[in-house]
Image: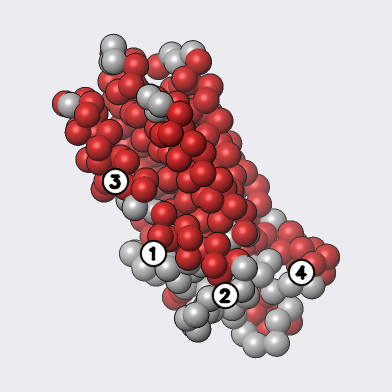
Amino acid sequence: ILIAVGGISFLVVRCTQDGQRLMRIMIWGSLPVLIYGVIQYLGFDPILWTRWGDAGPVISTLGNENYFGAYLALLLPLTLSQWFIAKNLFERIGFIVLMSLQVLCLFVTRSNGAIIAAILACTLVVWWRESFSAQRARAVLIGLLLISMVATILIAAQGDLIGEALVKMNNNSREVRPFTWQSAYNAVSARPFLGWGLSSFDLTQEQYASPRFKYHLFPEPRVMDRVHNLWLELAVETGLVGLSLCVVMMIFGGNAVLQVVDCLKDSEAKMMLLGCV
């Protein structure tokens, strides 16, 4: 879907109609996935899926509720942008039905990260539709970037305490992310500049995971293969050097796209590109 979004962005600048055609194919192509998600939610799934851990009830055809949630979080702002530029009542009703299915499936995945991302993305699309300024948009996106990084550091630094409190409150083994983040934080602290190498988190967690997490809170020892956090994953694998380069690339790349949006005169093209951003 990210490749398709990149292609749409390119086509929107070159030819608005081609970009719109590709975007609508991608959006309406999600309909079978959404219908299957609703079928699962209603309890009529004809396929017995193999699930890891305490998986949510709705995974559709993506095999994992977090993957399904991320897919929907990417689609929702695109669908919303198409609803804004729909030319007739029939199109508007169609996009409303589609967005309703997307929202329903998103919330029943119980994927908190995807829900927050979708809400933020759709809020920005609505806000920027009314009043877009590249300078203001740049400040907002950099602010969100910094907030997410600071929040990650604060939670990861006290991950064991937060995780233990959540497990006691909810009595639910799904609350393992703070422990995982603490393990990653410890690994980064041990080798901060260049990291431990690609796909190394499961190896470092053996050494840096909290014994309380691995042996006392759960019936069996647990070691996660992923951090489930972009910033910590990059920091573990590539160190602060790799993380800084990634952040710089994101800022410069995002700034270039925002400048293109600011220069577009076609309102439809601008709306579609905002959905992609």
Report if the CB atoms under discs 2 and 3 are less than 8 Å apart. Answer: no
Q: Which residue is mark 2?
A: 44
Location of residue 254 by image quarter? top left
Q: Residue furthest bottom?
A: 220
Looking at the rendered structure, the kind of residue marked 2 is Phe
Label 2 SS: loop
Q: Residue at x 38, y 64 (%)?
A: 196
Q: Nearer the viewer, mark 2 or mark 4?
A: 2
| 191 shown above or below 45 | above
Per the model, the C-alpha gap separating discs 4 and 1 is 29 Å
Q: Which residue is mark 3?
A: 25
Looking at the rendered structure, the kind of residue marked 4 is Val
Label 3 SS: helix
Q: Residue at x 79, y 63 (%)?
A: 165
Q: Residue furthest right?
A: 169
Q: Which residue is mark 1?
A: 196
Q: Residue furthest front?
A: 90
Per the model, the C-alpha gap separating discs 3 and 4 is 43 Å
Looking at the rendered structure, the kind of residue marked 1 is Trp
Q: Nearer the viewer, mark 1 or mark 3?
A: 3
Foreground of the two, 30 or 93: 93
Mark with earlier residue (4, 1)? 4
Q: Quadrant of the C terminus?
A: top left
Report if the CB atoms under discs 3 and 4 are less than 8 Å apart. Answer: no
Per the model, the C-alpha gap separating discs 2 and 4 is 31 Å
Disc ID at residue 158: none
Q: Nearer the viewer, mark 2 or mark 1?
A: 2
Residue 4, image x, y percentages: 27, 46
Q: Which residue is mark 4?
A: 167
Mark with earlier residue (2, 4)? 2
Residue 276, image x, y percentages: 36, 35
Per the model, the C-alpha gap separating discs 2 and 1 is 45 Å
